[in-house]
Image (spheres, rainbow, N blue to C red):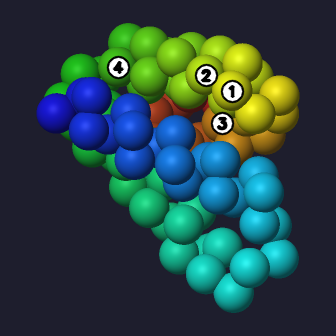
Amino acid sequence: MDAYLEEELYDLITYCIQNSSAPDYPTKENRIKKIGQELFADGGIDALENMYFSIEHRIREEISKDAKPYRSLWNGITNEWNY
């Protein structure tokens, strides 16, 4: 499951970074939030940390952009995640 979610999350964050004024931007952000909830339900805070670590590095390496601002979309899932 995580591999599929990682690919989807990578695609969504990449899209959001590159298309911040697109009309479907809020829909993409909402899906990013839901993926965080799914990950947390499946593996807790470790799952969130591991997934985002991987995504941040992939985005930095593949499109030379920063994914850190999107970490805050997962705020509120757990008190342990506060960015």
State how far apart marks 4 and 3 are (Cα). 13 Å
Q: Nearer the viewer, mark 1 or mark 2?
A: 1
Of mark 1 and mark 4, the one earlier in the sequence is: 4
In which quadrant will I find the N terminus? top left
Disc 3 crowd rating (10 Å Cα; few below 14, some 14-19, many 20+) is: some
Residue located beneath label 3 in the image: 71
Q: Nearer the viewer, mark 2 or mark 3?
A: 2
Of mark 4 and mark 2, the one earlier in the sequence is: 4
Residue located beneath label 4 in the image: 47
Which label was assigned to residue 82? none
Residue 76, relative to residue 34: is it above or below?
A: above
Of mark 2 and mark 3, the one earlier in the sequence is: 2
Residue 21, relative to residue 80: is it above or below?
A: below
- Is 8 placed left or right of 33 in the picture? left
Residue located beneath label 2 in the image: 58
Tell me what residue is drawn at x 44 percent, y 13 percent. Answer: 50
State how far apart marks 2 and 3 are (Cα). 14 Å
Q: Nearer the viewer, mark 1 or mark 3?
A: 1
Q: Amino acid at mark 4?
A: Ala
State how far apart marks 1 and 4 are (Cα). 22 Å
Tell me what residue is drawn at x 59 percent, y 42 percent. Answer: 75
State how far apart marks 1 and 3 are (Cα). 18 Å
Which label was assigned to residue 62? 1
Q: Splitting the image into 4 quarters, where does residue 53 fall?
A: top right
Q: Amino acid at mark 3?
A: Arg
Disc 4 crowd rating (10 Å Cα; few below 14, some 14-19, many 20+) is: some
Q: Amino acid at mark 1?
A: Glu
